[in-house]
């Protein structure tokens, strides 16, 4: 169902949440490659071709970044700040996907220019539905900026 | 009379007899004049001394200094051997006392600080002094004094005694005592008058001293009060700081509750669902039912966590007070409720133009909770009536109410109504998580008001709330 030429970058430290997210992608036939970064540093390494991704061609950008906020090493808000601060990634679609419903987190995320803010629901069926809509919008309907 | 003057006068007289006559006339007329002059001079001296004593009294001096200066002045002027101020111990019933100040001829013993038990003088003695009488004794051994009185005086070698009361207001404070020790002494009326004037002025000083002592006590008391206010303020500031710390802790606590407690629930729910989907074949009906139960329990817990967080948010969130039309807010909320179940027959009575000061968002939450409750607890009745209005009160704080004629309340448990997760009905009868009224109470409290309920089983319920403290109107 999707444009599967581009990957999805899932920034998630919880193995359970990672497995559930991957399962939801599968259920909705989202076949794009899903790259998982387990903390903020890894996510930035992937995007900017540093650390373990030195060899990567960073011109190939993910179609969307799914970003958890509570992360080891570098937290999600900081990752978002660095993505938006860099010319190469400032227009990259970033969807904050988090457990937190704190007003402050939401305000910070939007003011730093996240494209969506989705709170992970406890109910897996709702979560799966959110992933489906997300895939539908960001992979299928949305026109990416010409970068 | 001056002999020179007499010898000059002799030359003016024709013979010795005439001179004799002249002398006689002069002596008869001049001597009283000279005596009067002497008396006048003494009076002038006394006036001067009095003036010095009064001047002394006017200055802001300690009583001790005034006494000392006065004793010296008086002793000099009267050529007395001892002048002393005797003070009765307060509460001794004028039986005991001591000399607190004194000026004494070096030849005689000091009476200062010698405790004197005056019991032998008798009660009448002090009463007489209290009335302003003085004791004038020219010779203590020939004045009919009691033996023990003589004993008291003789230990200071007193021969003649002049004692004048020192009154502090109406109260006998002590005695101003003039002693002659060398020999008995006939006290002159002019001297007695002088001493009594001095005593009057000392009375004024005593009164001033008393006022001053009162004033000092008051100042000390105020200082004490100020200090305790300061201590209280410091305590308060400390409490505020502590409160801020607690608030911050609460803040980070709710954050971790929000995040950390929900995350495992998502795993439980997610993998239960995965089991249901992926291992459907291996699970019998019971197994599938168990998994469903796990899922609904996790979701319920997720809702509870959210409710708790929302409740804490109501306490933590910032509050803006503005003017709000509660009536129009109520109309909007009730219209939405009616729309959610258009088939229900509910009569709404909303008193128009109820205006309050408060936080719009919080008051909306408050009203939504109260109306939803009323809506819910009338759901088993074919027809219902829900009212919103305000009561006339004795205070400035308006009392608002939401009344329904639904399932009502058992007032036995009324005190439990507003606690979080408290439910008075079975969940199957009326669903809910028991957080609504706790939320209502917190919102009322944040506005400085309160909330309470009235009702009876199957006779409806009324919830009252105020949005500010109910100080009685003056």
Image (cartoon, coloured by chain):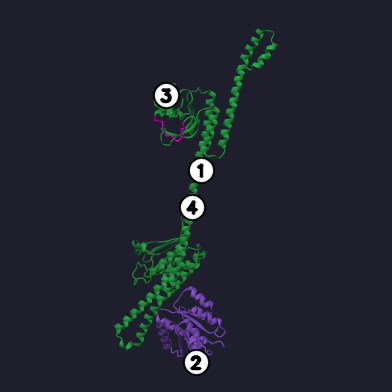
Where residue B234 appears, x then y in whole percent?
A: 48, 58
Q: Which chain is purple?
A: A
> The residue tagged with tag 4: helix, strand or loop?
helix
Q: Which residue is mark 1?
A: B215
Q: CA distance from mark 2 to mark 1?
A: 94 Å
Mark-to-mark CA distance, 2 and 4: 77 Å
Residue B330 in sight from this viewpoint: no
Answer whether residue A38 is magenta in the image.
Answer: no
- Secondary structure mostly seen in magenta is loop
> What residue sits right under mark 3 in the picture?
B145
Chain in green? B
Residue closer to the observer: A80 or B428: A80
- Classify A99 as above or below B471: below
Instruction: Find disc 2 in the rendering and name its residue.
Output: A5
Residue nearest the observer in this picture, B421 or B345: B421
- Kindly identify which chain the residue marked by label 1 belongs to: B
Left or right, B56 with respect to B289, comes to right
- Name which residue lies at 42% across and 26% down: B150
Q: CA distance from mark 1 to mark 3?
A: 42 Å
x 49%, y 51%: residue = B226
Q: Secondary structure at mark 1?
A: helix
**Magenta span has B117?**
yes
Whether the residues at callouts 2 and 4 have beta carbons within 8 Å, the answer is: no
Q: Nearer the viewer, mark 2 or mark 1?
A: 1
Camera-side residue of B103 and B132: B103
Q: Which mark is residue B227?
A: 4
State the extent of the magenta-drawn residues as a range: B109-119
């Amino acid at each position: 169902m999707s444009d599967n030429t581009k990957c999805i970058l899932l920034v998630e430290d919880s193995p359970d949440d990672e497995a559930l997210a991957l399962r939801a992608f599968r259920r909705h036939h989202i076949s794009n490659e899903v790259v998982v970064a387990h903390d903020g540093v890894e996510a930035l390494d992937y995007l900017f071709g540093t650390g373990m991704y030195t060899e990567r061609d960073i011109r190939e950008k993910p179609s969307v970044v799914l970003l958890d906020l509570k992360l080891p090493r570098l937290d999600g808000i900081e990752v978002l700040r660095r993505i938006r601060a860099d010319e190469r990634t400032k227009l990259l679609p970033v969807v904050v996907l988090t457990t937190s419903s704190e007003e402050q987190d939401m305000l910070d995320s939007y003011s730093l220019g996240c494209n969506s803010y989705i709170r992970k629901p406890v109910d897996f069926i709702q979560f799966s539905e959110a992933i489906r809509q997300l895939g539908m919008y960001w992979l299928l309907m949305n026109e990416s900026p010409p970068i | 009379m001056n002999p020179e003057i007499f010898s000059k006068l002799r030359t003016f007289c024709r013979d010795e007899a005439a001179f004799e006559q002249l002398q006689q006339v002069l002596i008869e007329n001049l001597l009283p004049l000279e005596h009067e002059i002497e008396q006048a001079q003494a009076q002038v001296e006394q006036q001067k001394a009095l003036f010095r004593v009064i001047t002394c009294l006017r200055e802001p001096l300690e009583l001790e200094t005034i006494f000392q200066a006065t004793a010296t002045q008086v002793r000099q002027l009267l050529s007395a051997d001892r002048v002393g101020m005797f003070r009765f111990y307060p509460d001794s019933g004028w039986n005991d006392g001591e000399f607190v100040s004194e000026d004494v001829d070096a030849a005689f013993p000091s009476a200062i600080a010698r405790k004197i038990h005056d019991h032998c003088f008798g009660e009448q003695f002090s009463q007489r002094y209290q009335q302003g009488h003085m004791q004038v004794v020219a010779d203590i051994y020939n004045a009919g004094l009691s033996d023990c009185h003589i004993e008291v005086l003789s230990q200071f070698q007193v021969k003649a005694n002049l004692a004048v009361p020192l009154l502090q207001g109406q109260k006998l404070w002590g005695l101003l005592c003039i002693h002659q020790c060398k020999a008995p002494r006939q006290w002159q009326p002019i001297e007695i008058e002088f001493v009594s004037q001095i005593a009057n002025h000392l009375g004024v000083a005593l009164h001033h001293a008393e006022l001053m002592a009162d004033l000092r006590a008051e100042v000390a008391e105020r200082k004490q009060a100020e200090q305790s206010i300061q201590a209280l303020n410091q305590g308060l500031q400390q409490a505020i700081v502590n409160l801020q710390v607690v608030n911050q802790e609460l803040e980070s606590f709710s954050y971790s509750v929000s995040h950390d407690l929900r995350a495992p629930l998502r795993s439980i729910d997610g993998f239960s669902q995965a089991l249901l989907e992926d291992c459907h074949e291996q699970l019998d009906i019971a197994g599938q039912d168990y998994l469903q139960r796990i899922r609904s329990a996790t979701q319920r817990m997720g809702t509870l966590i959210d409710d708790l967080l929302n409740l804490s948010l109501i306490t933590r969130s910032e509050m803006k007070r503005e003017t709000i039309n509660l009536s129009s807010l109520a109309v909007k909320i009730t219209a939405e409720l009616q729309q959610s179940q258009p088939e229900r027959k509910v009569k709404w009575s909303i008193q128009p133009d109820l205006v309050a000061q408060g936080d719009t968002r919080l008051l909306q939450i408050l009203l939504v909770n109260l109306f939803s409750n009323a809506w819910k607890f009338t759901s088993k009745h074919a027809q219902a009536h829900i009212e919103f209005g305000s009561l006339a009160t004795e205070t400035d704080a308006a009392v608002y109410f939401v009344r329904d004629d639904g399932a009502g309340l058992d007032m036995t448990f009324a005190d439990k109504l507003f606690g979080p997760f408290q439910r008075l009905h079975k969940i199957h009868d009326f669903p809910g998580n028991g957080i609504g009224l706790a939320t209502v109470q917190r919102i009322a409290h944040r506005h400085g008001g309160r909330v309470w309920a009235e009702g009876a089983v199957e006779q409806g319920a009324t919830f009252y709330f105020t949005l500010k403290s109910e100080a009685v109107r003056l």
